[in-house]
Amino acid sequence: MAIADALIGELEQEAVTTRRVLERVPADKLSWKPHEKSMSLGQLALHVAQVPGSVASIAVQNPGSFPENVEQGAATSVDEALSALGDSVSTAKRIVQGFDDAAMLESWSLVAGGRTLMTMPRIGLLRAIMLNHWYHHRGQLSVYLRLLDVPVPSIYGPSADENPFA
């Protein structure tokens, strides 16, 4: 199995779970923040939706450029976040499928202001930033749901609100 095929399989599986979490976002709370320093619920929902495609797009460039404008937009509706997720996953799948194993193992760097911020194999970028970073923020989103007293869906097993094994 090619490296890209394994990543795409995981991406597709996790996209289903991410969709379940985004579907629970209350549309009337998109401006809510758990703390002044936190992203709003709408910002976090859109970030979660956009991570795979955004990171995969950066992986095409070598070296990749750190985005100049890192201000996170906010979803104005749950449908917008769900649509962004569909677009993002489609983009990520298309890009990742274009990398053969040699390209996945190629050394990849991220630069900003003429400085190299990180260097790793491209597969490391996709694994750590496209996937693990995505899961991190999806977990953060599940905490937002809990704080808003929204039932948290099962992610990797039962939540306090949902048990797919019962």
Image (cartoon, rainbow, N blue to C red):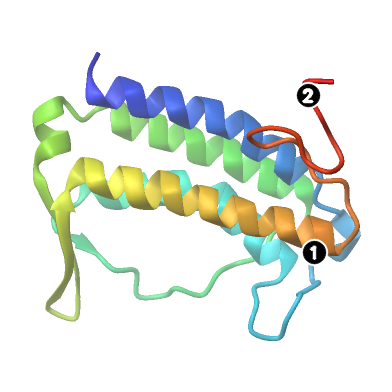
Q: Is residue 74 above or below residue 87?
A: below
Please give the residue where the numbered disc 1 appears in the rendered image.
30
Which residue is more in the foreground, 50 or 158? Answer: 158
> x%, y% of residue 17?
64, 34
Cα distance, mark 1 to mark 2? 28 Å
The image shows residue 35, relative to residue 109, as above or below, that is below
Tell whether 42 sits left or right of 69: right
Q: Earlier in the sequence, mark 1 or mark 2?
A: 1
Q: Outermost residue, top direction?
A: 1
Q: Position of residue 163 (x, y in %)?
A: 81, 29
Q: Secondary structure at mark 2?
A: loop
Q: Nearer the viewer, residue 44 or 164?
A: 164
Where does the image place residue 92, in percent across and percent down from the top left? 40, 37
Q: Nearer the viewer, mark 1 or mark 2?
A: 2
Picture quadrant of residue 100: top left
Tell me what residue is drawn at x 80 percent, y 51 percent.
25
Confirm whether residue 165 shows in the render: yes
Are discs 1 and 2 less than 8 Å apart at CB? no
Q: Amino acid at mark 1?
A: Leu
Element carrying mark 1: loop
Residue 74 quadrant: bottom right
Question: In the figure, 18 relative to 43: above or below?
Answer: above
Residue 23 lies, in percent from the top left, at 78, 41
Is 101 left, or right, of 142 in this rendering?
A: left
Q: Is residue 76 visible?
A: no
| Residue occupying image coordinates x 79% and y 71% | 31
Residue at 68 percent of width and 32 percent of height: 157
Task: Rate crowding at label 2 as few (under 14), some (14 to 19) or many (20 or more) other CA atoms within 10 Å.
Answer: few
Q: Which mark is residue 164?
A: 2
Looking at the rendered image, the quarter that the N terminus falls into is top left
The amino acid pointed to by label 2 is Pro
Name the residue at 35% across, 29% down.
Answer: 7
